Image: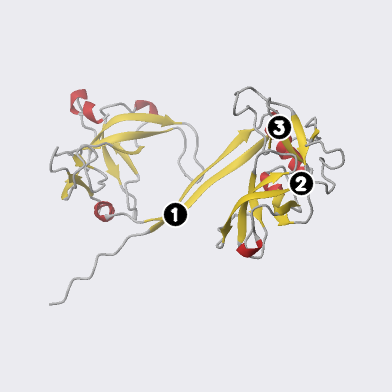
Amino acid sequence: MTAAPPPETLRAPLVVEFPFTRSLGPVQSAFLTGLREGVVLGVKTSGGKVMVPPVEYDPVTAEEIRELVEVAPTGTVTTWAWNGSPRPNQPLDTPFAWVLVTLDGADTGLLHALDAPGPDAVRTGMRVRVRWAADRSGAITDIACFEPCDGGPDDGGPDSGDGAPARPHDGAFADPVTGIVAAARLDYTYTPGRAQTAYINGLAERKTVGERCPSCHKVYVPPRGACPTCGVATTDRVEVGPAGTVTTYCIVNIKARGLDIDVPYVYAHIALDGAGLALHGRIGGIPYDQVRMGLRVEPVWTDGGRHPDHYRPTGEPDADYDAYKELI
């Protein structure tokens, strides 16, 4: 007898991305503008410590702090970790060390990359200096990386000569940086388990398949392989829907990047018939201001689509509130 081949393992590359625009206060604005001009600024706390990168509130007293000081572009490595396989968009595309560097005149560490030929060339206590980027715009990447250097603090930095830890700076620059775009992004490969694989394969046949808990008998869609309430495994598969009831909803007025849908539109939680948990989907085929709780809807599929494109009204009378109140 020939054994059946193992089921195909589903995999999909996924990206979670949320770039957002952040306005800067006077301290962060001065710090980033200073980097653009080749100057490293810190801020002095009420206790006399110099923090680099600077913060706007004292971490001990929580009071607002604004006293800016200039520190040297040289410093000392306090701890490090070797990165043998750089990822895309990291500071260097060759192996490097992540280091915490206490710049001369500062009391806290600045995290950045150290360009070194190998881990044997890195040590705690080594002296390093800033390598400035060729093109600077007012961002932490204006520091391209750190590089090894010789000598102690008295090498021409702002704290050389008279022994002062750092010198005051008014933070004034021409054309200051007042905002930045922070690009938060996570790339990963998703592999669904047994339960979600059955759910995804069911969608390919335009079916919605959930799993019933053997204890509380609720049917969960999409299934997770275990009941979130009882904590027991679920294996009994149940086809639900295709129609369902809008339990609650929101009107979307901001157009998402890469989403070809005109605003405003409605996104709703929909309790499919037979399901013990509402899933979410877009409502179409009805003016957005006519969508309501209790509205009966059905899925609309597009050619080649692996999930419903949206849900539209079925024309049935609205469901009674008591029929879906536990699923809101």
Classify mark 3: helix, strand or loop: strand
The residues bearing labels 3 and 1 have C-alpha atoms spaced at a distance of 38 Å
* In front of the other: 83 or 90: 83
Crowding at dot 1, Cα within 10 Å, few <14 / some 14-19 / many 20+, comes out as few
Give the quarter of the figure containing the N terminus. bottom left
Q: Nearer the viewer, residue 261 or 48?
A: 48
Locate residue 204 relative to residue 238 in the image: left or right: right
Q: Which residue is mark 2?
A: 73
Given residues 41 and 263, the one toward you in this image is: 41
Specify the farthest residue to the bottom. 1
What is the quadrant of the C terminus in the image? top left
Label 2 or label 1, whichever comes before in sequence order: 2
Mark 3 or mark 1, which has the lower sequence index? Answer: 3
- Residue 20 percent across, percent down from the top left: 56, 38
Q: Secondary structure at mark 1?
A: strand
- Percent from the top left, x then y, of residue 263? 47, 34
Q: Would you say 309 lies left or right of 138 here?
A: left
Q: CA distance from mark 2 to mark 1?
A: 36 Å
Report the label total: 3
When the figure is inspected, residue 165 is found, relative to residue 7, above or below; the finding is above
The residue located at (24%, 67%) in the rendering is: 6
Amino acid type at image mark 2: Pro
Q: State if disc 2 and disc 3 touch (CB < 8 Å).
A: no
| 170 over 256 or under it: above or below | above
Where is mark 1, residue-wise?
188
Q: Is residue 318 visible?
A: no
Residue at point 39% right, 57% down?
A: 12
Judging from the image, what secondary structure is the residue with disc 2 in? loop
Tell me the residue that label 3 is attached to: 43
